[in-house]
Structure formats: C-alpha cells, structure tokens
Image (spheres, helix red, strand yellow):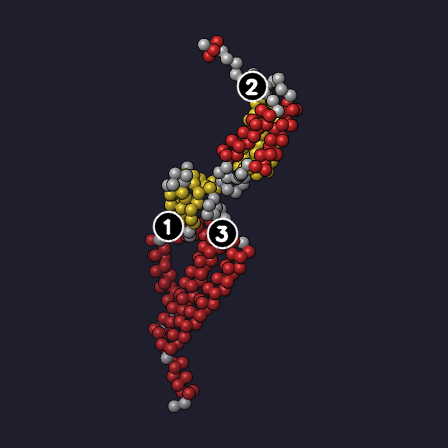
Amino acid sequence: MTVYDIFHILSESKLIKSALILVLAIIINYVFRFAINAFVKRVENHNPENAPKMHTLFSIMRTSVMILIYFTAAVFIFQILFDTDAATIVTATGIVGVVIGFGAQSIVKDSISGFFILLENQYAVDDLVTVENFTGYVESVTIRTTVIRNFEGDRLIIPNGNMTQIINHNRDDKRVLLNVHISYDESVDKAFAVIRTALEKASREVVGLVGVPELLGVTELGPIAVKILILAHCETGAQYEVERAVLKRIKDAFDENKIKMPMMEKTDESAR
C-alpha cells in the first residue's frame, strides 16, 4: 500500500474529516484571539483610561466570534458524520434558538444594553451617577450589570436593561455660585479689586477648583447690604470644599483690607 493509498483512505474517513474541521476551527479562533489581544494591548498603551471599556467590548467580540466559528464547524461536522443537509441543521438549531431566546429575553436585553453603554461611553468606572434616586460611584460595569456604591457604602446592582434614565455628574465641571455681601459704606470698586485678588490666589491654592472664579458683579441691593455674585467651576464632588475654601479667602482678604460686611441691627427684643 502506497502513501497515496493511505492518504486516500484517510481522506475518505468521516472521523478524519471531522477532526480536520475541528482543528481548523481551533486555529482560526486562536489567530483571531491573538489579533484581538494584540490590538487591545496597543489601545492600553496609547489610551489607558479606556482600557476597562475596551477589555469588556472585545471580550464580547471574542465570545461572539468563537461561538460563530464553532457553530459553523459543528454544522459541517454533523453534515459529514450523518449525511445531513446543512439547511436542515441550521433550521433545527434556529428553532431551538428561538425557544431558548424566549426564556432568556432579559439576559439578551441586559447584554445588548450593556454593549451600547460601553460602546457609547455613557458612563465609566469611578463616575458619579444618579440612577432611580440612588447616587453613588460606579464600581464596575459588565455586559449584564452595573454596580454603584453610594456614600454610605450601600451597593446597587442593577441590570443594564433597566438603566433607562442616568444622570452622569462627571461629564462636565460643576458650577458653584457664591454670594458675598458688603456694607453700603464700602466702595464697590475697592471690594471688586480685593475679591479678584482673593480669587486668583484661591485658583492656585484650592484643590478641586477649576480655573479662576468669575466675579459676575452686583446682583442685589438689599435692605442692609450689597450682594455680589461669584461663579466658580470645580471638579465633581468638590463643590462644598471649594465653596468653603473660596469664601474663607475672601473673608481673610476683607479683614486684611478693612472692608466691612453688613451686620444685622439688634432689635430691642434681642438687646435685652
């Protein structure tokens, strides 16, 4: 028996053909996974901030392609082993898939929603978000669920399919409006100059403050005081610290320059 005869016998064997198809599917899947992993590493090196999102997205892609490759290989193997028409196999698996799909609608819905959340970058890990009156930081995002931890340490685990209304507090800087009052006896121009100096100093010293706060001007002439409005921008979560720090520096500057702030007049009842 020649080598040609042996090769011919092996080529006619259904098991050998099936094994070759399976090996080919494994090789194709390995090459695809290698290419995807190499691409993800390049993305990580150039843009580390998007690494978690890319990992999740490409893990979904790897799984989807793997299922497609092995499903195609299984169809060919069944066709070879049982002399079954490929259309019949695809139809049968399609019916089974429909039955399974009805039982797993929520899983499919959550997975599709998670895919678009990651693809559109609606929110990411460490973002401050509000979902259904629950405010906290995103702890993790998977293809099916999002985990949010609030300031008290409580964790909300919500399916991605239920993430219909999300407020992301991290997409833009936060605005802080500061009201400062001066006495009618003081010069507004002098107060403006002192406030601007204090704001420039605060921009260099206050952590979380973004840029130099803007002095908007006089917004109200009250019964005993002139109200001056200041607009500041700060990082998410730093509103209260920034407000306290900026106001303190303005008060120190007023004291240093002897600018009087209004005092409520004592009534006869309070003076007793």
Q: Residues within 10 Å of mark 2 (few under 14, many from 20)?
A: some
Q: Tell me the element at label 3.
A: helix
Q: Mark 2 belongs to which amino acid?
A: Pro
Among the two numbered marks 3 and 2 on one chain, the one whose residue lies closer to the N terminus: 3
Q: Secondary structure at mark 2?
A: loop
Sequence-earlier tag: 2 or 1: 1
Q: Which residue is mark 1?
A: 106
- Distance between the alpha carbons at the discs numbered 2 and 1: 62 Å
Q: Quadrant of the N terminus?
A: bottom left
Q: Residue at x 51, y 31 (%)?
A: 244
59 or 230: nearer the viewer: 230
Q: Which mark is residue 119?
A: 3
Q: Secondary structure at mark 1?
A: helix
- Mark linked to residue 262: 2
Query: Where residue 193 appears, x then y in whole percent?
Result: 65, 28
Is 32 located above or below residue 229 in the figure?
below
Direction from residue 260 to residue 117 in the image, left or right: left
Left or right of 266: which side holds 110? left
What is the CA distance from the residue labelled 3 to the residue labelled 2?
A: 55 Å
The residue shown at (48%, 41%) is 168
Occupied quadrant, residue 78: bottom left
| Alpha-carbon span between mark 3 and mark 1 | 20 Å
